[in-house]
Amino acid sequence: MAARKILRIGHPLLLQKSQPVRVFNTHELDQLIEDLFDTMAENDGAGLAAPQIGEMLRVVVFDVENNPRYPDKGPVPRTVLINPTIEPLDPEMSDDWEGCLSVPGMRGVVSRYTHIHYVGYDSQGHFFEKEVEGFHARVVQHECDHLDGVLYPQRIKDMRLFGYNDEILKKEVL
């Protein structure tokens, strides 16, 4: 229906834990999900969490196909994930650059599990689960962090690998 304003780093809601969705298949939930997808698309996002638009519910969406912000990453199917739980399937982690619509114009290197199993519900309240690897696993972990009040800069181990996109690109680090 409409793209919404994205809260930026520093806004107190982004540091709070979200509440589980208790009632599914409602007009309000459908509206929230549509707004999340519209907002994500308008900003070339790979995913978006409800807290990023000021809605403190455990809802994330993601969808990556020919995204200009992630040109070398594979596709991630259009997904609505509600009340998610993530389980690492392998202790292996990998470092890669991440950005966030709530931290505009910046990137940082974050370590994430490479192989995960996640479970949750769709907008109708149907349970589903997936096992994913690589970029898909990274996107899910990044978006679900928002539900617990965690932004990716909080996970950066080496602050020398954090900065503005245009400065990083000058160094040809990406």
Image (tube, rainbow, N blue to C red):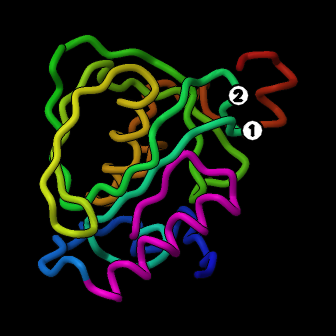
The residue positioned farthest toward the bottom in the image shown: 27
- Residue located at (15% from left, 60% from top): 126
Q: Is residue 60 above or below residue 79?
A: below
Q: On the rendered image, what quadrant is the N terminus found in?
A: bottom right
- Residue located at (61% from left, 37% from top): 65
* Residue at mark 2 to residue at mark 1: CA–CA distance: 5 Å
Q: Amino acid at mark 2?
A: Pro
Q: Is residue 38 magenta?
A: yes
Q: Is residue 92 magenta?
A: no
**Which quadrant of the structure image shows residue 130?**
top left
Helix, strand or loop for disc 1: loop
Q: Amino acid at mark 1?
A: Pro
* Numbered range of the magenta stretch: 26-50
Image x and y of residue 167, in percent: 82, 32
Q: Is residue 2 above or below residue 63?
A: below
What residue is disc 1 on? Answer: 68
Q: Residues within 10 Å of mark 1 (few under 14, many from 20)?
A: few
Q: Which mark is residue 71?
A: 2
Q: Which mark is residue 87?
A: none
The residue positioned farthest toward the right in the image shown: 170
Helix, strand or loop for disc 2: loop
Q: Is residue 106 above or below residue 127?
A: above
Do residues under tags 2 and 1 come within 8 Å of each other at their CB atoms? yes
Q: On the rendered image, what quadrant is the C terminus found in?
A: top right
Q: Is residue 172 above or below residue 10?
A: above
Asked whether, in this view, residue 169 is left or right of residue 32, the answer is right
Image x and y of residue 5, in percent: 62, 77
Camera-side residue of 43 and 66: 66
- Residue located at (48% from left, 43% from top): 153
